[in-house]
Image: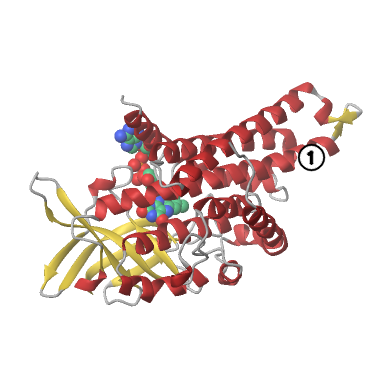
Amino acid sequence: MDFDLTKEQEMIKKEVRKFALKEIAPVARELDEKEEFSVELTRKMGEIGLFGMFVSEKYGGQGLDYLSYIIAVEELAKVDASQAATIAAGNSLGIGPIYYFGTEEQKNKYLPKLCSGEGLWGFGLTEPEAGSDAGGTKTTAVKDGNEWVINGSKIFITNGSSPISMGVTVQTVTGTREDGRPEYTCFLVEHGTKGFTAKTIHGKMMWRASNTAELYFDNVRVPEENMLGKRGDGFKQMLMTLDGGRLSIGAMGLGGAEGAYERALKYAKQRVQFGQPISKFQAIAFKLADCATEIECARNLLYKACWLRDHNRPFAKYAAMAKLYCSELMGRVVDRAVQIHGGYGLMKEYDVERFYRDQKILDIGEGTSEVQRIVISRHIGC
Ligand SMILES: Cc1cc2nc3c(=O)[nH]c(=O)nc-3n(C[C@H](O)[C@H](O)[C@H](O)COP(=O)(O)OP(=O)(O)OC[C@H]3O[C@@H](n4cnc5c(N)ncnc54)[C@H](O)[C@@H]3O)c2cc1C
């Protein structure tokens, strides 16, 4: 067993850390406060190669392994969840489906721009009445000559309405299968297509500097060549995309936990009460010891899941486990981190306040914790 990162992975970790501290840390609090998506930061993240990390160089990507990408997300999340979310969704959910299921024409048309950070692509699965029940899709696509006509709506779509959003992959119902169940097919819909509108969702508790949208499709016509993969493959494509996406949510949980822990440890060593640093009180030291131990467990689980994926082994069970464990771990760590900061931890001047809010989405997005437990229990034969 080799627990060391490769030289290349070590370098990526160091460079992304340096970038996050220099470019993101100084503006993270202000962007969160103003609930503002930053095109400038997104472009800068593109310039240093954070989009398309696992995509072949042929399409403008970096040709790296999945673990390298996960390490990059982890490093961003140590500093700011919103920017980490832009990268995680941009790669796993935006670029992923086109790269893995798209035609050569689709890849050549969209991937270079998405891999440079010039544009963003959304993943349109969730609907107002179809959340955890991802098969409850109501959006339809009806064939009309050489075109498909899409009607319906999507909600909570990350990167769906930013000034640089180029389009979205949409799961639609295209008919009924022989077994009587709905037939799902995905289409690529570009912004600017007649009848397609996107509205930014405001008032979020978390990921306030990340873009989230509601999407509406009113008789949107797309040509046959905008179909992603084969007719009827939509649901399978979406679930496979989510397996990879769960690793990036895991990375956000791990990175967020590490960020909160680092801040709590530093604070505990500086804050003096009853004549000594509070880190010397066993009640505080044990909280930090638990954080350090659980973070180590989370990293091993997440990296193992990535290793399985990078070695083309089945990894869906481990992806669900890593997503569940890392998300809930961050919940425990941010709770302890705020507690260690006392009243100051509840103030916006302290990053742990933002980390505390940013954690909650991890228990909900890309399959809630309950859904992860359902997935895991099926894998273990329950
Ligand atoms: C900021 C943000 C970004 C997002 N980005 C995207 C995106 O890019 N693309 C996209 O498609 N979606 C996105 N989502 C949607 C997200 O994936 C859904 O919110 C999530 O899947 C849960 O769906 P829901 O909110 O409808 O909750 P519901 O499914 O209504 O769940 C409500 C509660 O019921 C529980 N529950 C439901 N079914 C079961 C069951 N069978 N057993 C036990 N408990 C159950 C859930 O676990 C949850 O606790 C995003 C959401 C947010 C908030």
Left or right, residue 106 beside residue 204:
left
Check the image and report above or below for 59 versus 28.
below
Categorize mark 1 by other alpha carbons within 10 Å: few (<14), some (14-19), many (20+). some
How far across and how far down the image is residue 348, in percent?
68, 50
- Front residue of this view, candidates 295 and 286: 295
Q: Amino acid at mark 1?
A: Tyr
Give the residue at x 32% y 52%: 238
Query: Which quadrant of the rendered structure holds the C terminus?
Result: top left
Q: Quadrant of ligand 1?
A: top left
Figure quadrant of the N terminus: top right
Q: In which quadrant of the rendered view does residue 300 lie? A: top right
148 lies left or right of 130: left
Between 111 and 356, which is closer to the camera in this rendering? Answer: 111
Q: Is residue 127 left or right of residue 251?
A: left
Name the residue furthest right: 275
Q: Which residue is mark 1?
A: 267
Residue most toward the front? 1
SS for dot 1: helix
Residue 207 visible somewhere in the drawing? no
- Residue extending farthest top: 282
Residue 157 in percent (x, y) is at 40, 58
The x and y percentages for residue 146 are: 14, 75
Name which residue lies at 49% across and 38% down.
Answer: 322
- Position in image of residue 104 (x %, y %): 32, 71
Residue 170 visible? The answer is yes
Residue positioned 55% across, 46% down in the render? 251
